[in-house]
Amino acid sequence: MNPKSIKNIGAVDLRYADEKAIANIKSISNAGVVLYSEKQRGLIGTISMSNVGMMEEIDEDYKIEMGNVEINRIYLESQDQPLKVLVVGVVRIHDDVTKELFNEKVGGIYNVGIVECPTVLMGVVKAKVIKNIGMFQEFNPEKETVKGTKNVTQEWLQSLEDDTSIDVMGTIKMINDFDIELFDKKIKSLKVMGLAIFREKYQEVFEKKSAGNVMGDTRIIPDNCELIAGNTVFDAIELKRRTADKVYSAGTIIFEHDVDAESLTKGIERILGAKAIYAPKHLLDALIPITETNIKVMTYDGKLIINNGERTITETELKFSENTYHILNKGEMIIDDGIPAELLNEKITAIDNYGEILVGKELYGLIQMKLKINKGSVEDNTAVKELEEDTDVIANMGYLKL
């Protein structure tokens, strides 16, 4: 039987594995949590481990819960024994749970994620959390809690009771037209844990209602700007359809190689708010005067390759491509071992890496030289390949029990 290589697993549970099974595990990598019990304590030292979020010895009577766990009064009252649980995800404790009931029915919690509970229970809940590598979020049952993204609209405001207190866990957008007086009447207070995006005309009422209770980022969009949500690509045809105006981007703007300076300035008067701009070198002189000074402008030669998922660059692709490549990697990119160094050097002009690049040792140094930005990782996958050839790989699972 080949030894096992375990990778990309949310939780690896070794508590019930015997000595033979442990000895057959060669490596564990990219795991959120690795669990073992007292009986494996002296055995797991033989396992090669990398990029493990938490490694913990816990008793076998602890349940493992992946995802969302709801704890309410009925759930706790139904427990014959005190609840012992490790949560990888979100555990929400309802407001019908009393301090006395929680104290009696909960034996211990390991938190690898988020614990949400009413403000009045925060003290007793924290006392039961044995280890926390996530976060606590308290809520007031008398407030309306919004998760994810909330777009403030006239219809939503009309549906609220007067003087409603709102807690936002995510993003609140005040972009659409609505009656400011209605907002003032319906919203008593506003607390944001995440991102607040609003037009300049709503700034005064937002700051009045939030009173500084914003734990995250705030972006103010000038009223005379067009909002561009997310990442945007402009080509020559798209710009010809536009009349010059100001744009506010919440993401990255990319200009294709067919855009010239004249179509750029005719289509866009001013660029604000963008995280970054990627443009061919011939647009740089036209871009600088119309771009907000704090926006990073990146130029590229040839073709801009954007990878947000998984992609392999091969010798065949480079050999028959008429273009050189500037690579923007935000996912996993594999550089094929068969590419001649001369061809790679000729065809790839630069790499901006925000993800993971896997490359063999023969090309590793050359790829490092091509990096203009490296906020991710570049790994020599030679050892990984050799390991996988000699092992059975278990990968890409939420929970694995051995």
Image: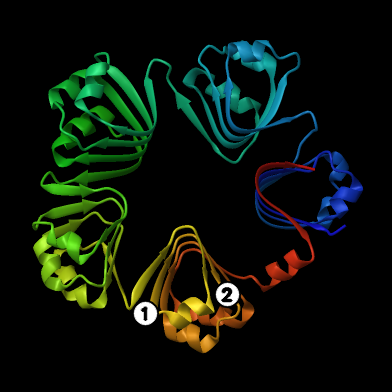
Q: Which mark is residue 323?
A: 1
**Location of the N terminus (image quadrant):** bottom right
- Place of residue 98 in the rendered image (x, y in percent of width and height, measured from the top left): 57, 12
| Residue 241 visible within the image | yes
- Place of residue 7 in the rendered image (x, y in percent of width and height, measured from the top left): 68, 54
Q: Label 2 belongs to which residue? A: 336
187 vs 280, nearest the viewer: 280
152 vs 197, nearest the viewer: 152
Q: Residues within 10 Å of mark 1 (few under 14, many from 20)?
A: some
Q: SS class of the residue under badge 2?
A: loop
In the rendered structure, which amino acid carries the disc numbered 1?
A: Asn
Q: SS class of the residue under badge 1?
A: loop
Q: In percent of the image, x 19 and y 35: which residue is there?
A: 176
Q: Residues within 10 Å of mark 2 (few under 14, many from 20)?
A: some
In the image, residue 105 above or below residue 382: above
Q: In percent of the image, x 44 and y 86: which residue is there?
A: 346
Q: How many marks?
A: 2
